[in-house]
Amino acid sequence: MTKAKGMSRRQFVSTAAGVAAISSLTSKSVFAATRAQSSGSAVPALRDEPTWKDQGVENLAKSPHAKLRDIPVHAVTIQSGFWGRRREINVTRSIPSMHDLLEANGRMNNFRRLVGKSNAPQIGPVFSDSDVYKWTEAVGFVLQSGDRPELRAMAEKLIDEVVAVQEPNGYLNTYYQEEHKPLRMLPQTQTTGHELYNMGHMLQGAIAYYRATGDRKLLDAGIRFVNDFLLPNYGPAPKKPIVSGHPEIEMGLIELYRITGDKRQLDLAGYILQGDKRIELPEHRTIYMYSGTPFTARTKLEGHAVRAMYACCGATDYYMETGDEAYWQTLNKLWDDMTSTKMYVTGGVGSRSDGEAFGDAYELPNFRAYGESCAAIGNMMWNWRMLAATGDSKFSDVIERALYNGINSGMSLDGVMYCYRNPLAFDATTGDKIRNPWYDVTCCPPNLERTFGSLPGYFYSTSNDGVYVHLYDNSQLDWHLENGTGLKITQKTKYPWDGAVEMAIAPAQPSEFSVYLRIPGWADRAEVTVNGKAWSGVTPGKYLNVRRQWSQGDVIRLQFPMMPQVLAANPRVADDTGRVAVQRGPLIYCLEGIDQPQGVELSEVGLRVGKQPESEFHSEFRGDLLDGVVVLHHPGLVAESGASSSVLYPRYRGESVKTRRVDLTFIPYYAWSNRMATGMQVWTPLLES
Amino acid sequence: MTKAKGMSRRQFVSTAAGVAAISSLTSKSVFAATRAQSSGSAVPALRDEPTWKDQGVENLAKSPHAKLRDIPVHAVTIQSGFWGRRREINVTRSIPSMHDLLEANGRMNNFRRLVGKSNAPQIGPVFSDSDVYKWTEAVGFVLQSGDRPELRAMAEKLIDEVVAVQEPNGYLNTYYQEEHKPLRMLPQTQTTGHELYNMGHMLQGAIAYYRATGDRKLLDAGIRFVNDFLLPNYGPAPKKPIVSGHPEIEMGLIELYRITGDKRQLDLAGYILQGDKRIELPEHRTIYMYSGTPFTARTKLEGHAVRAMYACCGATDYYMETGDEAYWQTLNKLWDDMTSTKMYVTGGVGSRSDGEAFGDAYELPNFRAYGESCAAIGNMMWNWRMLAATGDSKFSDVIERALYNGINSGMSLDGVMYCYRNPLAFDATTGDKIRNPWYDVTCCPPNLERTFGSLPGYFYSTSNDGVYVHLYDNSQLDWHLENGTGLKITQKTKYPWDGAVEMAIAPAQPSEFSVYLRIPGWADRAEVTVNGKAWSGVTPGKYLNVRRQWSQGDVIRLQFPMMPQVLAANPRVADDTGRVAVQRGPLIYCLEGIDQPQGVELSEVGLRVGKQPESEFHSEFRGDLLDGVVVLHHPGLVAESGASSSVLYPRYRGESVKTRRVDLTFIPYYAWSNRMATGMQVWTPLLES
């Protein structure tokens, strides 16, 4: 399926034709009546280039400072392969079961309660509405790839129940009701109460659903919240002040602006990103929230990792619309800070459980890593925006690192268990449960679902001179260049298990343009041929510009080196002293206890690698294991038994620990903890043989 | 000064003669009147062997399962030397300034408020009373070493103000008043409200003050709380249940029992140690509190470290009184768990800031170490009790490790700044302030003060066959053997800077007995002579039993090897992989940035040690530095500049990092952070030269 089915341009027009049709769906007629009389309630027409169904994960069609433009999710069909299975399970198991869990945990009754359809009390944290919206966004992305009637029915029912509780003034939130009603939008509530965070996710969910179906129902509710409730009352003095207690609304407002063209929405996002001095906050709070002070005064990543990532996303969106140079300098400074001192080898960020926060520079503990799934997703989203602004492959390298590892680890292979934390080492004797079907703070599961749902939209971008290829997997692109020339690209590959990618380039008519092929930073002996002839200038960590006259039948073949690589950490990362990690292609590997010979403790093993570390691993595809993975075998070392029972602080004698050889087996990190609980580690000591 | 001055046996008797004299000091006459009519208010006579002024840190004179018996604090005079300066500053600066800080922060007004002498509101956390009691205990110990009129005057005023608020029923707490009064002793309050914790510290403070002065005023208030309020109303059914939300009362009750002989107090402690099923608590809470379930069912150390240590102290006290074998087995299991998997090389315990808690086995982070000063003190107190029960030197090794390092680090050299956390590595760029003059949770400062105040009581114990020598420093013992023979021991030494200790043994008359000399576990080439002749059987980590006919003029000379030693950690301690620590004598050393050549980053240095690591250090006494310390010089290595700016995850090439030689200077860990803030680390990587 490459295109959304069962929906037509006409359907979109008729759905968007007027407010009355939507109002009639609300169950409290008083709302509709009041709204009908409200001067602020008219929902504006939308700018329609490109049309709703051709908008990508972001709609950058009019963004003056975006170098690349998203392709729509429906333009890429991911076929059987690495991501195909993950995406199918996401649709058939994860999203439906999360719907049931949201129901079972009262998230929808929170809405029904307000229109007299449920007697259940308000339940869950203040940000519970956002769980519903993120789930809606996941469905929206899935429907962008083609109709799924059962999911669409679920979503339509849910959307009806959401819009039913919107108040005449545009306000929409199930928590700030009854005894909590007086707290609405108070500075303290904005600081901790997630009102605007919820609405940011509502906007994102509404936009994804609109881009799938053309259905404006939820989108119009979002517009009413912004245009009727927020814009007239909140903003720079003399309006009431805003603080973004958990950044998210910024992204929502700017993506809305990209649809409506209403610059007030963009300006409001810019105002929020700079903070409002009228709301005075202690420094530790503005650090934690990564908001409340001017974004452009930030010099490092700190505080709550998801908040910081979402703030950076919003700020990059703001830059792409405005070209504000102060934002750009800040964003690059923060990116350097993160990638050189605060990012795990898995692309995870946020070292500390305490405050779910970034740690100090080089503070990257393994066992105690937090690495929240949402933060890795935020990292990918931010880098997607930085990539769009520049076309620089250093950003796609981070996207790939996070996606294949620190995000992919967040969902179990069967699609119904989720990680909140994604540690890089695990001691099973602690009894910690890393994968769980439900969290009362259930931000991560639907976040993972929306990410996998949106994945086709991350494969390609267009530029004014051609097309960028970011990700490799069996897939078909059916889209067009920015000049309108139709373009199909078919990828055939077993990537990431195998490094060969065959890519058929088929423009509608012969045409000169650039195909920018991403050469991953890890691929230091990559080869590219066009129609069998080597193409020169292949540089790891750069896009290879293959510019020529293309016509049907042209074939690019890429060959990436899939030799296992051994990575060191910066010596300042104290937790990785004397240790190395193993990577193969884009995948970070780990040792899981269950795969090692009986009696071998992970804490006692070491790798034995010399000047040719690649030659000391043997790769084997195991179709029967973990839905099919390449495992790596390595003749390592294990301390002779007894070493572990030594006293805590033995005298160092300048002698090597006595070791014996042991066959170690590595699996991809993303696949850990899908069998019985045993230990796991990514960073393993080097031992001398 | 070796003995308390200005107090006589007669004074004690007259003070203890009756309640009326005390009652007349209370400012609310209604209390005295009511109490006079109360049948429960008669304060019993105390058992008086040994007399108040000859009781040690613990009074083990009648404890059937104690092998060793404490000597009184006044029996040892610590003279000029390592501990002499620390103790003098404790008395002249720390304790007086803490008195002023307790005043300035409203801790005493909390008492005055209740008798109409202050209009200030209740202030500080629920355990604020305990700060006052721990300070009183510090003064009590100081006065045991000799009168300090100014401190005594402060303490007397404070004690008057404390006892003035005791209610007729014996209840005493400044927090559970007015709107908090209905919360008294509710199960939830016991779980989190520190009522009994406060009273445990009150008993300890009262007992220390009583042992210094014979003054029963505060002690009798404590007895009334226990005998009038607690015992009649709380305990096994049909009385109301108790849960020890923060263990401490157990130690207090048992030490009180050792004075009063009232077995109900001991039994109540035993009841508390076993928990009461009538108070149902979630498992995470009983883990955190280290109480609420049977102590004898514990199998590992976990939860809040100070709570766990205090529980272990109480349980060991209970064992020494009862000989309950289940306690003994549990205590030894827990001790093995702690010392082999959860204790820092500094003797600090409690790895996690989150919950101020023990971590998992081998979870011993350095930068993020919690290592609360109170927990190291609790560790020392527990090992002191285990030592008393056994005479086993493995416990004194832990005492020395904690005292010289993880406790000693807790107070600045000038005596007015305190550590709450005692990390083993520090990055100054974080801006963290590790030493502070005041914490709103100010448990650690007065805890350090009482510990240094009580220190003379830890130097020696007696046994039925002689005397044990635990600590070495310039000092004089003036005491007697258990058979009554007078004994003076004079130590002359520059320990721990120098390994030579001269010890003059002078019994009142020639007598055969054992002098058990502690040979520290680190001292693997120690030598002992008696009157110039070598004594055989010297074994590190054991007490050397020097049994002979002793007479005046006999001299023992000990020579401990003071070569720097290089320590490794158990390989399971992931945070110390590839790293070593340096110890000299009992002192753990660290690198502090300020002592290294300019431009050298601690994160980039390594030690260069081969099979004779000791020979690669040069010791130098620096009288001008940090109040006089031996520093260690080592020709180490530093990565060539640029290494630190490498990307986060460079490829490992099987090649050594390029390094150059650098002169590294180590200082004792306890003295870190007494100059401008720079980095610090205890565990440093080994690099190949």
Image (cartoon, coloured by chain):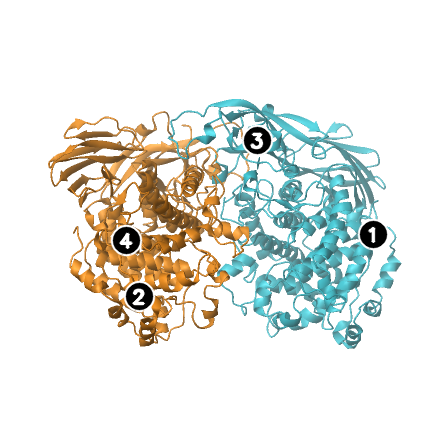
Chain colours: A orange, B cyan
Q: Chain of mark 3?
A: B
- Per the image, label 1 sits on a secondary structure element best described as helix
| Foreground: disc 2 or disc 3 | 2
Q: In the image, is residue A192 above or below residue A625?
A: below
Q: Amino acid at mark 1?
A: Glu
| Foreground: disc 1 or disc 4 | 1
Q: In the image, is residue B199 above or below residue B169?
A: above
- Say which residue label 3 marks: B566
Report the Cα–Cα distance between label 2 and label 1.
80 Å
Residue A626 at x, y percent in the picture: 27, 46
- N-terminal of the two: label 1 or label 3? 1
Report the Cα–Cα distance between label 2 and label 4.
45 Å
Report the Cα–Cα distance between label 2 and label 3.
77 Å
Q: Label 4: few (<14), some or many (≥20) within 10 Å?
A: some
Q: Amino acid at mark 4?
A: Asp
- Say which residue label 2 marks: A42
Q: Chain of mark 2?
A: A
- Say which residue label 4 marks: A414
- Say which residue label 1 marks: B150
Evaluate if marks 2 and 4 touch, with contact meaning CB atoms under 8 Å apart: no
Q: Amino acid at mark 2?
A: Ala
